[in-house]
């Protein structure tokens, strides 16, 4: 895209990082002549700033504008399967397994999440349940605000509750499972986090939901 230096300070929508843009394979041409801030009303113009607070008006190429317009299409025009239906085949698929440090985590879609320790290909000690399936985020019935938040974060979530008792707080373990699109991948556990004692977040990457708006 083309970038032009702005004479007067205008509103900034981002930061111009030439190294980062180069890494992402953007082509950049910086014009020699400055322009007056706010003069252009074209929809293909965005205002950004460099890390030194220099303002630039950038004209997006036609391809970028098309992608932007495609993303803004009304999701109500989508007539394909819902996210839950797209993920449903995972019920019959093998459980997903990830080992992190001492623990191995096993996620069985729509059923439960287990945590255990393996030595020499055998489970040693107790099998802890991080939760049993309770519900999935309802894209149709949730409030508009909650729905918008999920769309911005670009994930679908499920809730698993009533797991094994936590020795630290005496409460049942629980977990949130987040499904994120990853083109060309299978289903796998990308990460396991424990933001609070015995409360977990599993992030699942899958290609199954990538074409849902």
Image (cartoon, rainbow, N blue to C red):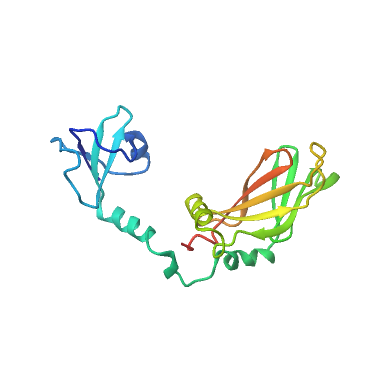
Which of the pair 212/148 is nearer the observer? 148
Which of the pair 43/124 is nearer the observer? 43
For the point 54% across and 67% down, the residue is: 82
Hey, which residue is sitting farthest bottom in the picture?
79
Residue 138 place in picture, x, y as percent: 59, 62
For the point 30% across and 58% down, the residue is: 66
For the point 72% across and 58% down, the residue is: 133
Residue 83 place in picture, x, y as percent: 56, 64
Hey, which residue is sitting farthest top in the picture?
52
Residue 191 place in picture, x, y as percent: 62, 44
Quarter occupied by the N terminus: top left
The reply to whether residue 43 is in sight is yes
Which of the pair 126/167 is nearer the observer? 167
Residue 180 place in picture, x, y as percent: 55, 53
Q: Is residue 31 above or below residue 113?
A: above
* Quadrant in the rendering for residue 169: top right
Q: Left of 200 or right of it: where is 148?
A: left
Q: Is residue 200 above or below residue 89?
A: above
* Quadrant in the rendering for residue 48: top left
The reply to whether residue 113 is in sight is no
For the point 25% across and 41% down, the residue is: 28
């Amino acid at each position: 895209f083309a970038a032009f230096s702005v004479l007067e300070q205008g509103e900034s929508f981002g930061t111009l990082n030439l190294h980062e843009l180069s890494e992402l394979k953007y082509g950049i041409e910086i014009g020699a002549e400055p322009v007056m801030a706010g003069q252009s009303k074209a929809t293909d113009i965005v205002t950004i700033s460099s890390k030194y607070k220099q303002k630039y008006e950038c004209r997006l190429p036609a391809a970028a504008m098309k992608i932007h317009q495609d993303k803004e299409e009304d999701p109500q025009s989508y007539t394909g399967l819902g996210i839950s239906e797209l993920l449903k085949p995972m019920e019959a698929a093998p459980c997903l397994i990830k080992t992190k440090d001492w623990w191995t985590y096993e996620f069985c879609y729509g059923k439960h999440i287990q945590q255990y320790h393996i030595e020499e290909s055998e489970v040693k000690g107790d099998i802890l349940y991080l939760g049993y399936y309770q519900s999935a985020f309802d894209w149709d019935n949730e409030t508009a605000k909650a729905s918008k938040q999920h769309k911005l974060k670009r994930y679908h979530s499920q809730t698993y509750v009533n797991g094994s008792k936590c020795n630290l707080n005496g409460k049942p373990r629980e977990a949130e499972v987040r499904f994120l699109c990853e083109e060309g991948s299978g289903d796998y556990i990308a990460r396991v986090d424990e933001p609070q004692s015995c409360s977990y977040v599993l992030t699942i990457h899958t290609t199954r939901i990538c074409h849902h708006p």
